[in-house]
Amino acid sequence: MDLRKAQLMGGGTVLISLPKEWVKRQNIGKGSILVVESSVNENLLIYPFRTEEARMKETTITYSTSYPQGLINQITGAYLLGQDIIKIQGKERISYQGRDIIKNAMKQLVGLEIVEEDAYYITTQFLLEPTTLNPEKIIRRMHLIARGMYRDAIISLLERDEYLFKVINQRDDEVDRLYFLLVRLIRSAVTNPKLANKYGLSNIELLDYRVAANLLETVGDASVELTDSVPDLASFYIEDYLRDALKNASEYLGDMQDSAVKVFLSKGADDARQVVRLYNNLTQTLEKFKLTIMNNQSQKVAELLSIFSAINKIRRCNVDIADLVVPMLAIIT
């Protein structure tokens, strides 16, 4: 820690000296222009004014045919860590199958594009400007897609609609893409206070955004679990006494998630009461649903219990999102 004593000058101006080692590292001299910004938590950010683009972060990954999944993990990890340029370099020629693996991995990573390529290497670059992106909009987009996923999953179960079954998996890929993008932005903002300041988020809020995004990604996964619960949709039929319970659960989940995300983004504690009300109503619906399933002697018990488990997981995620702002557990219990 380096402590500096403030000096009062004429006209109410207060001066402090800058640490010598920091000045050397930043190449600051007489006449250098510094930017002074007030952060969201009222701290000051001081950094040199640069007209040129900041140096991009770059990493090189060695291509290997022995462990394709490891290659995917390295590309994804470099992306999440905020690397701007990711090079895949091979000691041997990159095969057609290898290129296909790399390009499929890139489909999950928003903004990452191939900028150079030959027989032995592939160079990719993140082409989006982080300062133009908005974490709140990404959360809202994830919320809307995930909410539509489980609503359509339940409709597909009730109506035995195989088309909806297929598109739900595609939407889950989009939720994953947005999640990876948000994680990248959050990591970049944590290490770059200037970027966090542009987003208007403190470090604690950045952490909350990461958790909320993870919960919404889990909602997407649970929606896929709803469709995976029934291997043979064409022969699956839900009796009338269970259909109403599923319809009600779908409506409660959608309204509950709307309220939970609103609580999280607006930090409005008053909206938490709506989450609690919907949580209690949904709990009663699910308890009746589970009791009916357990008393059901048909061969569909396993599938129905899987559906119940997925719905319960989504409910829990919605409570946890609101819990980031208001301690929901204390209210509910």
Image (tube, rainbow, N blue to C red):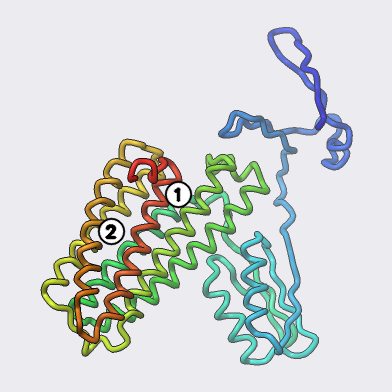
> Viewer-proximal residue, 250 or 20?
250
Direction top: furthest residue: 10
Left or right, residue 27 beside residue 50: right
Please tell me whether residue 45 is drawn above or below residue 15 in the rendered image: below
Q: Quadrant of the N terminus?
A: top right
> Viewer-proximal residue, 117 or 237?
237
> Which of the 4 quarters of the picture holds residue 163?
bottom left
Secondary structure at numbered mark 2: helix
Q: Position of residue 30 (x, y in %)?
A: 85, 30
Q: Quadrant of the C terminus?
A: top left
Which numbered disc flags the more N-terminal residue, 1 or 2?
Answer: 1
Q: Amino acid at mark 1?
A: Glu
Q: Amino acid at mark 2?
A: Leu
Residue 136: mark? 1
Left or right, residue 320 beside residue 3: left
Q: CA distance from mark 1 to mark 2?
A: 21 Å
Please tell me whether residue 131 is drawn above or below residue 97 in the rendered image: above
Q: Position of residue 25 (x, y in %)?
A: 85, 42
Secondary structure at numbered mark 1: helix
Q: Residue at x 32, y 87 (%)?
A: 231
Left or right, residue 268 beside residue 65: left
> Disc 2 marks which residue?
253
Are the two marked residues, 1 and 2, in contact with CB atoms closer than 8 angstroms? no
Q: Position of residue 98 (x, y in %)?
A: 64, 87
| Label tally | 2
Q: Nearer the viewer, mark 1 or mark 2?
A: 2
